[in-house]
Image (cartoon, grey):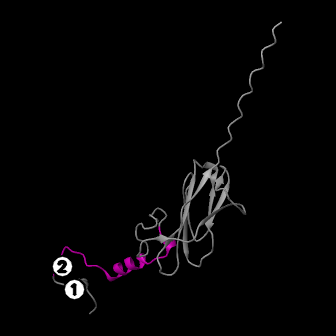
Amino acid sequence: TGLTATAFKGSAALTDTQQPRSTCGMLLGYVASLAYASWMACDREMEVGGRSVMGSSPKKSSRSMVARRGQQVLTQNTFTPGDVLSIAMDSMDPGQEQIRASGGVSGCVNNEALQLNTAGSSGDIVVWAGHARNSNGIAVTDKLVLRMATANAPPPPSPPPPPPPPS
């Protein structure tokens, strides 16, 4: 005659006020714990040794972050407000990745380079990424700090002219 709600309860120990756990709900929870790194919400913690992601604590990545202005790599990790920067990891990997930026400018993207327009930057920018392949858990890169260039101070005023010679 088909399944009824009482068939899911299984045990007489459950009271009438308790809700039965659905097999589907438990399965969805399990699948979510094994989901792709790029499915992770951008505001969720992503730190080495931090909160469990995909069933394990994030580990330290051997990869690093690279910032470019056009095709030029920022060798001094310094930007000028108004620069458009492309942020990526140093090598390609066939897995999933999420790149984040916080500080003077914020952003978050999955599986592509992060493009940052620094025109409204309020200071230094910190970039990092998490990546995973298969079900090996995620690895998190070291954070790269991009320093906002400070404007050169104006030159000091010229000294006053010398007094006229005594007459």
Q: Amino acid at mark 2?
A: Leu
Question: What residue is pinned by disc 2?
Answer: 14
| Callout 1–callout 2 Cβ contact below 8 Å | yes
Q: Is residue 25 above or below residue 68?
A: below
Question: Quarter holding the N terminus?
Answer: bottom left
Q: Residue visible at 61% across and 49% down?
A: 120
Q: Position of residue 81 (x, y in %)?
A: 65, 49
Q: Amino acid at mark 1?
A: Gly
Q: Secondary structure at mark 2?
A: loop
Magenta highlight on residue 31? yes
Q: Residue visible at 64% across and 44% down?
A: 150
Question: Quarter holding the C terminus?
Answer: top right
Magenta highlight on residue 129? no
Residue 66 tag number: none
Q: CA distance from mark 1 to mark 2?
A: 9 Å
Q: Residue visible at 42% across and 72% down?
A: 57
Question: What residue is pinned by disc 1?
Answer: 10
Q: Position of residue 14 (x, y in %)?
A: 18, 79
The magenta segment is 13-40
